[in-house]
C-alpha cells in the first residue's frame, strides 16, 4: 500500500517546519489559486502559467516556497537512508558531483557528503525565503531587482535534490510507494522552471532521459 508522504514526515519530529503564507495576503490568495488548479486535475503545463493580471514575481515567489516545502518533505522521508556512509559525496551518479558554496562558511566550492549538502541547502533556502529584503511579505514592498536571479539559484539547487534522490534513492521511493507522488512533484517543478526559463538547460542533463519519458 502506498504511504502518504505526510504520514512518513510526521514520524520525523526533528525535520524543519513548513514555510507558510499569511492568510489574507495577496500571496496567500495566489497560493490557494495554484493549489486549486493542481487539485482540479488540469494539465500541469497549464497549471504553471501566469494567471492573467498577476505579478510574475509574486507567482514565482509562491512557487519557490511551495517547491521548497515539497522537496524538503520528499528528502526528509528518506533522510535516514542518505548517510555519510551511503552518500559520502553529493552526487548524481558517477558523472555529476555537486559542491557547496555560500557566503559564510564555504566561500570556495567544497566537496561534501549528500546529507551535509542537503542540510546546508535547506538552511540556506529557509534563510532566504524568511528574509523580508528578498521575499517581502508586506503590501507595497517591492521585490529586489535581482529576485529572479536569486530564485534561479534556489531552483537550480533544488533540482539537484531531485537528481540525487532519483539516481541514488529510487529504491526508497519505490519501497514507500511514493513513486507517483514524487513523479508528479517533479513534473510540476520541471514544467514551472521551463515555463519561465529559470534553470539552465545544462543543469537538467542528469535527468534528461527520465524527463523525456515522464514529461512528454
Image: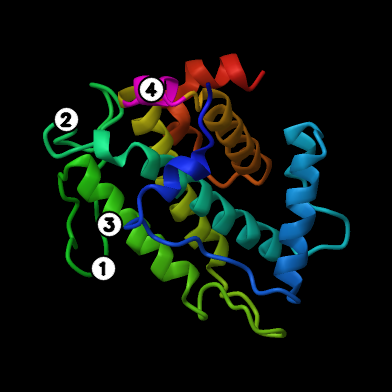
Q: For residue 89, which quarter of the picture?
A: top left
> At x 55% / y 59%, what residue is drawn?
65
93 and 205: which is toward the camera = 93
List the residue tagged with mark 4. 170
Q: For residue 66, which quarter of the picture?
A: bottom right
Which secondary structure, mark 2? loop
> At x 19% / y 51%, what residue is drawn?
109
- Label annotation for residue 213: none
Up-down: is 182 above or below 138?
Answer: above
Residue occupying the far right of the picture: 52
Q: CA distance from mark 1 to mark 4?
A: 32 Å
Nearer to us of marks 4 and 3 is 4
Q: Crowding near pointer 2: few (<14 within 10 Å), some, many (20+)?
A: few
| Residue 173 on the magenta span | yes
> Is residue 7 rendered to the left or right of residue 48?
left
Nearer to us of marks 2 and 1 is 2
The answer, for residue 24, to whether it is visible in the render is yes
What's the magenta region?
A: 169-176
Q: CA distance from mark 2 to mark 3?
A: 18 Å
Q: Main secondary structure of the magenta part?
A: helix
List the residue tagged with mark 3. 120
Nearer to us of marks 1 and 3 is 3
Q: Crowding near pointer 3: few (<14 within 10 Å), some, many (20+)?
A: some
173 and 135: which is toward the camera = 173
List the residue tagged with mark 1. 103
List the residue tagged with mark 2. 86
82 and 192: which is toward the camera = 82
Residue occupying the far left of the picture: 85
Lower sequence index among marks 1 and 4: 1
Percent position of residue 112, x then y: 16, 45
Percent position of residue 70, x then y: 52, 47
Up-down: is 214 above or below 98?
Answer: above
Amino acid at each position: 500500500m502506498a504511504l502518504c508522504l505526510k504520514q512518513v514526515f510526521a514520524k520525523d519530529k526533528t525535520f524543519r517546519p513548513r514555510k507558510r503564507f499569511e492568510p489574507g495576503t495577496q500571496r496567500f490568495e495566489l497560493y490557494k489559486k495554484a493549489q486549486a488548479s493542481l487539485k482540479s486535475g488540469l494539465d500541469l503545463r497549464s497549471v504553471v502559467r501566469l494567471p492573467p493580471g498577476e505579478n510574475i514575481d509574486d507567482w514565482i515567489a509562491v512557487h519557490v516556497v511551495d517547491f521548497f516545502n515539497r522537496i524538503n518533505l520528499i528528502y526528509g522521508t528518506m533522510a535516514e537512508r542518505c548517510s555519510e556512509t551511503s552518500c559520502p559525496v553529493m552526487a548524481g551518479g558517477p558523472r555529476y558531483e555537486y559542491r557547496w558554496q555560500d557566503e559564510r562558511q564555504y566561500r570556495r566550492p567544497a566537496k561534501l557528503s549528500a546529507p551535509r549538502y542537503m542540510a546546508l541547502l535547506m538552511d540556506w533556502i529557509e534563510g532566504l525565503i524568511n528574509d523580508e529584503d528578498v521575499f517581502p511579505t508586506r503590501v507595497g514592498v517591492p521585490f529586489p531587482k535581482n529576485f529572479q536571479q536569486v530564485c534561479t539559484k534556489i531552483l537550480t539547487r533544488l533540482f539537484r535534490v531531485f537528481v540525487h534522490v532519483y539516481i541514488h534513492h529510487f529504491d526508497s521511493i519505490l519501497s514507500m510507494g511514493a513513486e507517483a507522488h514524487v513523479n508528479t512533484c517533479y513534473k510540476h517543478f520541471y514544467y514551472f522552471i521551463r515555463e519561465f526559463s529559470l534553470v539552465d538547460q545544462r543543469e537538467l542533463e542528469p535527468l534528461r532521459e527520465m524527463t523525456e519519458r515522464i514529461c512528454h
